[in-house]
Amino acid sequence: MKRRTGSASTIDRRTFFRYGAAGGAVIAVAGPAAKAVSAAVSPAPETPAAGAFELEEATIADLQKRMESGRETARSLTEKYLARIDAVDRKGPALRAVLETNPDALSIADALDAERKAGKLRGPLHGIPIIVKDNISTADRMTTTAGSLALEGCIPASDSFVARRLREAGAILLGKANLSEWANFRSTHSSSGWSGRGGQCRNPYALDRNPSGSSSGSGAAAAANLCAAAVGSETDGSIVSPSNNCGLVGIKPTLGLVSRSGIVPIAHSQDTAGPMCRTVADAAVLLTALSGMDPADAATRASAGKAASDYAKYLDPKGLAGARLGVPRKALFGQSAAADRVVEAALAEMKKQGAVLVDPVDLTPSSDVGDAEFEVLLYEFKADLIAYLAALGPRAPHRTLKELIDFNEKNRDREMPYFGQEIFEKAEKKGPLTEKAYLDALEKTRRLSGKDGIDKTMDAHNLDALVAPTSGPATLIDLVNGDYGVGGSSTLPAVAGYPHVTVPAGWAWGLPVGISFFGRAWSEPTLVRIAYAFKQTTRHRRPPRFLPTADLALGA
């Protein structure tokens, strides 16, 4: 959603979307949130180094080879990642990316090792430690709180579909990631990555920089090698933006490819979970595991005959050859000079690899859907959140948005030490989803982003994908004024419900900058193929150094 930029009714959507839309050993802050966050945002002149890590940058395939050879087991991998979390997230740089770890992780690993020994392998995720965002429900000894103290201690009666799919695939749910509280749909002046439970999550490349949100902890955790891979969720930008800021591959899937059931919502017309990984190959493996039809989510019925059985099949190193890529300069360039420079170099490289650049192409500006999208989200948030809380049954500590607003007011010192709940209050005033204002806004956003937006442009030029900067480099954490935006390309694919893939494309002052590929609904195979070919050619990903601040000597 957008921050105010003039009139009282205008919201700067980068505030929400660029930095967010979407029990156990707690690795959170002790004491009042204000004290904890102050410490988190003011690193010492020299932040203690994280030290060498044996599994640094290890891919899912690497970890499987280690287990196949007997060099590692699921238990030993889990132990090493838990030690890494302790060294980097709790101590040392103190990223505050992980809210809590799974107290049953080691016993789960032992069971999976026993299965492997018996010759039963569930697939490429067997024994692989994964961190999930704390709005993804898990029915275990971890809580699901969306980062809010209002849901502290809440354990749902059943897994979300996403958590169940991961368990069935043999993944170890290692822990819950910090996030922008309520997926950054609480205040117009929020700091992305801040939650009442976890304090301020920090960017592992420069600790005074914002990891972006709302999947802040998922991004920081995967980037810092606290896990093999992570799962985030997005309403508009919450997967791709933290992936941009943290040097990751992020995939925001087509709406309906991944079930929304059991995920704390913002808006059913845009919400989806997706992979956040260090490589395209890992993201393809994770996307395959997450996908599937769910009787509890009607939107997934549309995936029948359209979802791929294995997205790893599309990892083609020559995938750029002949690919027709549209470059929407007027709509999505010119927001960040540093990002534009990085993407210009990337475009030149893709052309060398045989891509056909259609440059420029016209595309609906994101600003054309801005206010209408925010209207849709306000309506859907109130309705969808009430439905989520009702599904918790007697386990729900609160049942309505009004009760959450009252809780925040009563606990202002812990929940609102820096910013308020203006968005909560706006949403509370909305009526049912039958109101004309909602229906008109929904029709407008879908038409401008899809039929008259992405679809129209791609059809006119026979395109395989559109390409643009994902966003600018990470901005500074600012608890006084809140987030400030540096542009982004997330809105149109998010509002249309279409897939969006971001890949590291280069650097500015030592900070990662991503490039985005997006296109029609169900075009994940094409986007994975293009993104993989680009990443194999350029290989811009590198691990973070946990610097106290950006290295300006490196230049843009």
Image (cartoon, grey):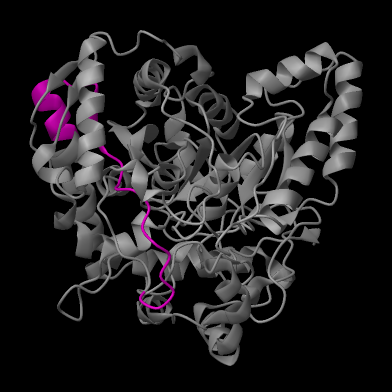
Asked if one can make out residue 260 in the rendered structure from this viewpoint, the answer is no
Image coordinates for residue 123, horizontal then vertical, percent? 70, 20
Image coordinates for residue 410, horizontal then vertical, percent? 59, 91
Q: Residue at x 18, y 50 (%)?
A: 335
In front: 258, or 62? Answer: 62
Q: Is residue 81 left or right of residue 225?
A: right
For the record, the magenta segment spans: 455-481
Image coordinates for residue 112, horizontal then vertical, percent? 85, 29
Q: Residue at x 72, y 43 (%)?
A: 173
Q: Residue at x 73, y 50 (%)?
A: 87
Q: Quadrant of residue 501?
A: top left
Q: Looking at the rendering, in which quadrant would you find the N terminus?
A: bottom left
Image coordinates for residue 108, horizontal then vertical, percent? 85, 38
Q: Looking at the rendering, in which quadrant would you find the C terminus?
A: top left
Asked if one can make out residue 58 in the rendered structure from this viewpoint, the answer is yes
In front: 282, or 507? Answer: 507
Vertical placement of residue 48 versus 357, above or below: below
Q: Quadrant of residue 348?
A: top left
Q: Residue at x 36, y 63 (%)?
A: 16
Q: Is residue 409 left or right of residue 245?
A: right
In front: 131, or 158? Answer: 131
Q: Is residue 17 left or right of residue 486?
A: right
Q: Residue 276: say if magenta.
A: no
